Amino acid sequence: MINEAMHHWLIELTHLAYDVNDTLDKLSTQMLTGMDETRAGSSKVQSFIPKAKLYFNNSEMEGISHRLRKLSTKQKELLKNVSSNTEATSLPALQRSPSSIVLNTPVAGRDGEIRKIVGLLSRDYESSRTTNFHSVAIVGMPGVGKTTVAAHVFIADAMEQFYPKVWVSVSHNFNLERVTRAICRKVTSQPCDQNDFSEVQDDLNRAIAGKRFLIVLDDVWSTCDCESWTTMQSHFRVGAPGSTILVTTREEKVAKLIGATEVYNLKVLSDEECLNVFMQHINNHRPPNFDAVFAKKIVEKCNGLPLAAKTLGGILRCEEVDRWNEVLDDKLWSISNNESNRLPVLKLSYHYLPSTLKRCFAYCSIFPNNYEFGKKQLILLWMAEGFLQQPEGSNQMEDIGGNSFEELLSRSLFQKSSKSNSLYVMHDLVGDLARWASGDTYFRLEDKVDGKCSSKTRHSSYISGKFDGVTKFEKAFSEAKSLRTFLPLSISHGHENYLTCKVTFEKLPKLECLRVLSLNGYQVTLLPESIGHLKHLRYLDLSHTLITSLPKSTTTLYNLQTLILENCSQLKALPGKLKNLAKLRHLNNSCVPSLEGMPPQLSQLTNLQTLSNFVVGKGNVSRVGEIGPLSLRWTLCLKRLENVTNVEDATRANLLSKQGLDALQLEWSGTDGKESEILEVLKPHINLKELIIKGYNGLEFPTWIQHPLFSEMTLVVLENCNKCRFLPALGQLHSLKQLFIKGMSSVESVGPEFYGKAGVPFPVLETLEFKNMEDWKEWFPWEQSQGNGVFPCLKMLSISTCPKLKGSLPKNIHLLTKLGIDGCEQLVVSTTNIL
């Protein structure tokens, strides 16, 4: 790999690139400032251009030029050494044979998995299959033991039914010719070194024709493209029926690429199994005080990965037993000089990431172990840091970020949280790898023994405490003049922390290179006007604070892309000149109950994609038509729609054109007599997935709500629509899974109008709730039911505070697992008929 001198040279080059970027950003920001002054009618247009030139004639640029010349000279010397050692330093393919893996790797805790995979490979497949072979993939994160399990499957007695049996280590660089030659050599026991590749292919076809073979391709990466795989599998078609391809990979998309008929996701080991693997690798070389507490400390380091258990055992086996505690307690053990001996597979995984993904992955080092993060949260941070390049005519930065996120997820570097499907985590070992990759440009306060970052630190995070005083930050950030990221993180999910005003009023405004600033969860009531000094700021998160307003200077943050004000319960107004933030892409102002309206001319924010909450003002203030030109995505809530007195204004909102909206909430807090006309023209695009309507006082719902063209609609909430006497035909929404109907006090019966006429109603509905239906008296069955239930997939049914409802519940709800009835005294409930 790269020698030490080159490593230090690259570090210096990285910091120089940061400084150049900051300087250019200053120029760009000054130009934006000048253009805004020009738009405002200022006469300063003549003066801002000479200022721009000053940036390229000052000592700052001279210093950068000197550093660049110095690094260029050093580069020439280093490249001479690198070019002469290229062959020696290139990364060799990991040629692992199954026999050596089995001999050297424990298999504790994997007997069950091995038996299942052997069963998958031995299964008889239908003769009607279009191919005479099938593919099985073992998928798992690096170090979880995929190769070990595959090796034990390979030598299992049941695999003797296959002949020939071939094992090929593919590794990171999938080369069709190299892999084909390797298979041919194993099958024919010949060198297969012909110059003409087609001759090798012919030899392989002849060797496996009519034979039931097993070919294991170990460690396949996404460098295997569709064309290469199609060419390779053409050779396998000549084999006998029942032939099998077994692939191990860390990436789910590889399993899809090869058309795997079975995918086995290999999970981490239990603590006991990890300890067994560890014990096999220390050869009983352990300290005399090796007890349960000691064992727990070891398995905590392993985190369920047999790779970690093996490498940790190898490390401690080489240490004196009286130093074991010292090694295990070292917080920085994962980024020490011996890192390459501890996480070889993970380092390899990082080494072959594309350069753009390396930056995105290294950025995740700011998260503490076991921290749960959201996909959109991380993408917006990447975007703020400039990691998501957007060539002209390419996808949106958010889409590029989404692809990068999915790539890291498919490589098992991210995992879905076990607590929430919308959150993600990194395995501790993967987090350690990220911290190794991030180097000295990233800083987590809890990781530093001296609690101090260097002048080269660019990105910082820390775990927010209940009371964070000035002493916590005085030493930590005293030298971080070029800091780009100030990110407090909560691991307790509480939002009642306190931050000294000396940080917000004195420390933060001096960090003029900041691009990411978060005060999320702090009980901050006031921000200084000096926040306007942070001209580089792209991301500002003030969620869960107690601010009542934003400083006027916020509207001079011309680079701001993301402004998060979620759950700012005291916030009453947004700055009047918010339209000046031309680069603003995301405004999350959800759950801001005190917000009285929106600033004027929001339609000028043409880059805006997220607008969580639009509060319609009275008269000509904050008209709903302002959102018409905006290409909004994800979630939109329109509140106080009673203030829309002009149907044409509602039409100009143009919701029908907003294809990227996933969720739409329409809310009235009063009545103006035009609700029906307003709701009719607020028809969204058919891509909508979730619809919530609250406080609507029209006599009936428009027909678009029940139209089957809303084929992706999975959730509908109708709440406090007090004047509607009938429910819409929601049974026609064939993807609807959750339906909540609350406070519909004028509804007296539910029947055919609810089911609709488009086949079996509610074919996939799983959750149905009725609540506070004061005049509801009858629930009629579906007339076309002939023994089959109207709710074939319903799992949860809840009916509460419906005091006049009589009769019985629908019958034959066979999948029902939860039934809640409360405040329905006249309702007859018989579980016999229901189930």
Image: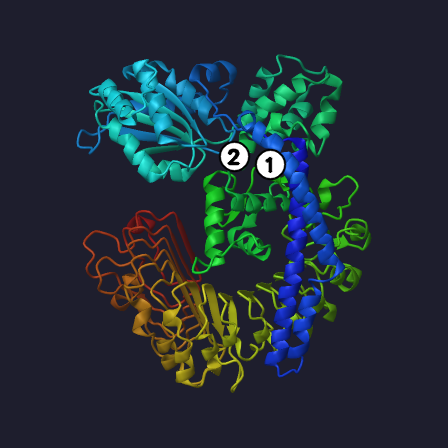
In front: 530, or 95? 95
Q: Residues within 10 Å of mark 1 (few under 14, many from 20)?
A: many
Three-letter amino acid code at the position of disc 1: Leu
**Which of these two is toward me, 264 or 770?**
264
Tell me which corner region of the image, top left, top right, bottom left or bottom right, holds residue 246.
top left
Which residue corresponds to the image point at 32% horizontal and 13% vertical from the top-left? 189
- Please state which of residues 182 and 523 is positioned toward the viewer in this rendering: 182
**Which residue in the structure is indicated by mark 2?**
349
Residue 802 in the image, given as x and y percentages of width and height: 41, 66
Q: Is residue 115 above or below residue 142?
A: above
**Residue 653 at x, y percent in the picture:** 42, 76
Name the secondary structure under disc 2: helix
- 292 sits left or right of 561 in the view: right
In the image, is 659 to the left or to the right of 754?
Answer: right
Question: What quarter of the picture does the N terminus occupy?
Answer: top right
Q: Are marks 2 and 1 in contact (CB under 8 Å)?
A: yes
Q: Is residue 26 left or right of residue 685?
A: right
Q: Is residue 490 visible?
A: no
Q: Tag 1 or tag 2, which sits nearer the N-term?
A: 2
Q: Tell me the amino acid under the disc marked 2.
A: Ser
Q: Which residue is mark 1?
A: 433
Between 725 and 765, the one lying in front of the other is 765
Q: Give the x, y percent position of residue 806.
A: 33, 64
Q: Quadrant of residue 308?
A: top right
Residue name at image x 67 percent, y 65 percent = 535
